Amino acid sequence: MLTGPEHVDAAAASPRRRARSALRRALLRMDRPWRHLLLAALVGVLGAAVVSAFKHALFALEALLVHAPGGHLVTAAADLAPAARLLAPFMGGLAAGLLLWLAERGRDDAARAADQGSGDYIEAVAIGDGRLDLRRGLLKVAASMLVVSTGGAIGREGAMVLLAAMLASTLGRRLGRVVDLRLLVSCGAAAGLTAAYHAPLAGAVFVAEILLGSLALAQLGPVVVASVMSFGTTMWLGQGALLFPVGALPPVEPGQAAVLVALGLAGGLLGAALLRWLRLARALFVGSRLPLPLAFALGGLVVGLLSLWRPEVWGNGYSSIEEQLTQAQGWQTVALVLVLKLLAVGATTGSGAPGGVFTPTLFAGTAAGALGAAALGGLGYTTGPTTIYAMAGMAVLLAATTHAPVMAALMVFEMTGQYTLLPLLLAACVLAALVSRRIEPLSVYGLRGSGEPGGRVARR
């Protein structure tokens, strides 16, 4: 007979088990498609909520550590003294590396063997059973927060998507066999991406093109529902519908349309080059055999050194994208920042620091598109607004690195609200993806083709 604390714990657990069993029975009474749609809607709401909570926590940490106003790390870097600008990414990388290193070092072989699931949502869906290891995932999120909040040149959105996917995986595992766990985690990833970029269509197609490798309605329906519910919840929480609002643009003339589509070819070449650079940077760090804390710290030190030249190398590139889309800069400045930013991104991701390259890729595409417009203008060609070429650059470079052309075109359209450019973006993105895949068969996610598993050489 149980007495004391054990009895209290058992008594408390019993109602939870009964409630869970009742929920399973209720779900089993529903047709499978309706069951998945209902759970997808729930995952969409929860995914948006957890992404919003992560943003607030991250911005608070950035304000505490580097006095960044509202997540604008470039502004913070410009205001810091040179010594602080140099050391902040170094210290953040060192702290993140120590966190992961000590967490792993303190575990014995039995604890490692008992791990269930992956720490990466793409692996869990593309080549796994949808199980995500909560401990490993949360450690990656915490380490990513340390790197991002101190200026590391890596995306914060990767941790957001991972959190939403982990929440979906945890919910699915609690419900047991009444749900398709891979599909539920896919819904979580779509909800996270939608909340991060305010792009519900692109969030759904991201899952279809990259994670599931299929546009089957049975799979796409719940993912779309999760994305739409995530977007609605994000708006309800007070965030704007467009991530990068762009003013009205003049109609694209036929000659300009041909040039924009042709940019897809150049984008494919640049995307393949970017993939090779990221893999080379990772190989250099792996070959150095540095302990994890020192590798992270070295990556941060490179970012700090580069930021002494231009503060724009800090962060994921969000502020620079915003500036380029609203007020064009001189091509010399754009070219310099692009080169330094690519070096910083290579150093951060090459060190193994957890985070994303999604937004840094968007920045590189924006800069490349602006440089393309400047080059055409120098040759005497009337290009029209530079913003159009910057947006096209974003789309084609994203398509070339992810090998997901439909997602890339939809994402740029949804982030900027420029619907009239969507047909041109789709055509350019298809060309970019074809060219890049021909040169580099593995996407930035380490997947071959559309969702076919390949060697894991990069992380989101």
Image (cartoon, helix red, strand yellow):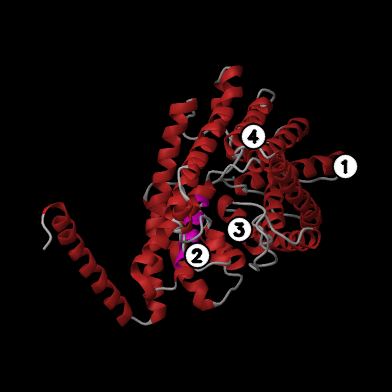
Image coordinates for residue 272, horizontal then vertical, percent? 77, 53
Q: Specify the quadrant of the image occupied by residue 302.
A: top right
Give how far apart the Cα atoms at labels 1 and 3 are: 28 Å
Amino acid type of disc 2?
Ser
Image coordinates for residue 229, horizontal then vertical, percent? 41, 61
Mark 4 touching mark 2, by CB under 8 A? no
The residue tagged 3 is: 419
Q: Nearer the viewer, mark 1 or mark 4?
A: 4
| Boundaries of the magenta span | 184-197
Give how far apart the Cα atoms at labels 1 and 2 are: 48 Å
In-front residue for pair 223/128:
128
Residue at 57% in and 69% down? 212
Quadrant occupied by the N terminus: bottom left
Q: What count of labels does the image hold?
A: 4
Q: Earlier in the sequence, mark 4 or mark 3?
A: 4
Amino acid type of disc 3?
Tyr
The residue tagged 2 is: 186
The residue tagged 4 is: 299
SS for tag 4? helix
Q: Which mark is residue 380?
A: 1
Q: Nearer the viewer, mark 4 or mark 3?
A: 4
SS for tag 3? helix
Q: Earlier in the sequence, mark 1 or mark 4?
A: 4
Which residue is farthest right? 379
SS for tag 1? loop
Apparent side of residue 458 relative to residue 384 in the rendered image (left or right): left
